[in-house]
Amino acid sequence: MEVTLRFLPNDYKLKKNYLDSNSNNIETLVLGSSHAYYGISPKYLSPKSFNAGYVSQSIDFDYEIINKYRDNFKNLKTVVLPISYFTFFTTLETNMESWRIKNYVIYYDINKPHHLSDYSELLSNDFKINVFRLGGYYIKRKIHVYSDEFGWGTDHNSKNAVSLIETGESAALRNTFDVRLEATKRTFEENVKLLYSIAEWCKINKIKLILLTPPAYQTYIDNLDDHQLSMTVKTANAVASKYENCQYYNLINDSSFTAIDFYDADHLSENGAKKLSDIISKKINGLK
């Protein structure tokens, strides 16, 4: 069953296969969590762009992806890295979706396991979920791959959008952390250190680094903790101020994004993704 599960198509395989074959040609690399995965479509950027972001992908795995392909990025000119409200305060290991770590270990060949279960499909998911996955593919012929050929997430369509009011409050609550806790402070410090490491690598290799806080709907913004948001913005500004190759854009309150641009209160729909991607494309061209 473990072997059969590993044969199932998935987004992680798609992204690794693309990077294995094309990392030496990529000019613009997008990293980050679901805000990047659903919010930035490479087809609206330069022709040689790829979105290596994914759901719940924390900055330590962004760093690991760069580190894995660093010698292959011969033509990389720009790295785009969203700095969301939660970016500095959490990791995939501490996230409720920590089961996703096994996907990086098994399919990306990133040697960053935290538990024995990270080496196994069977040990990472509930047995019923695995049976459902196998039945869906081998019986119903359903392929659960949601990335397009350039890594952008296609399943947050505006036709299936959910309540912007309900998700605004629930998402803000889920993404807010007690910054007074020692564990949160340590996570913050470690993630900031990783961001500086990414910025330093970009500087050494003459690569532009674009940091941005993605747009969000007002119901999400209204429920954010001011102190956590302030720490996020100040830190991103500090990194951009230190490195000439780095620019930071805070778009969380960008009024050009309206309800139709959102799938939920903190994720863009295909309409919003086009709009944000066009903005980023202009920023990239402006840095040349």
Image: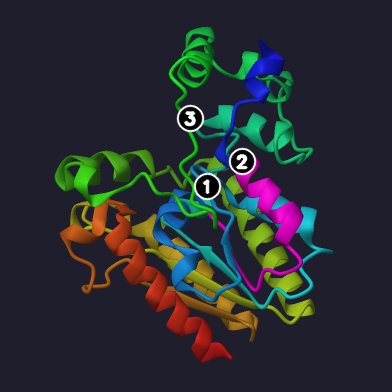
Q: Is residue 105 left or right of residue 150?
A: right
Q: What kind of residue is marked 1? A: Tyr
Earlier-in-chain disc, 2 versus 3: 2
Horizontal and vertical percent for residue 228?
40, 55
Residue 96's mark? 3
Q: Nearer the viewer, mark 1 or mark 3?
A: 1
As for residue 44 lying within the magenta part, the answer is no
Residue 54's mark? 1
Horizontal and vertical percent for residue 276?
36, 69
Q: Residue furthest right?
A: 71
Earlier-in-chain disc, 2 versus 1: 2
Image quadrant holding the C terminus, namely bottom right
SS for callout 2: helix
Earlier-in-chain disc, 1 versus 3: 1
139 or 194: nearer the viewer: 139
Residue where numbered disc 2 is placed: 12
Inter-mark Cα distance, 2 to 3: 19 Å
In the image, what residue occupies the spot 48% across and 32% down?
144
Inter-mark Cα distance, 2 to 1: 9 Å
In the image, what residue occupies the spot 70% across and 36% down?
107
Question: Would you identify the image quadrant in which residue 99 lies?
Answer: top right
Q: Is residue 280 left or right of residue 23?
A: left
Q: Which residues are magenta?
A: 13-32
Q: Quick check: 73 above or below 17?
A: below
Q: Do the CB atoms of the residues marked 2 and 1 lie less than 8 Å apart?
A: yes
- Label 3 packing within 10 angstroms: few (<14), some (14-19), many (20+): few
Q: What kind of residue is marked 3? A: Met
Inter-mark Cα distance, 1 to 3: 15 Å
In the image, what residue occupies the spot 67% across and 68% down?
26
Q: Quick check: 60 above or below 77?
A: above
Horizontal and vertical percent for residue 103?
64, 33
75 or 288: nearer the viewer: 75
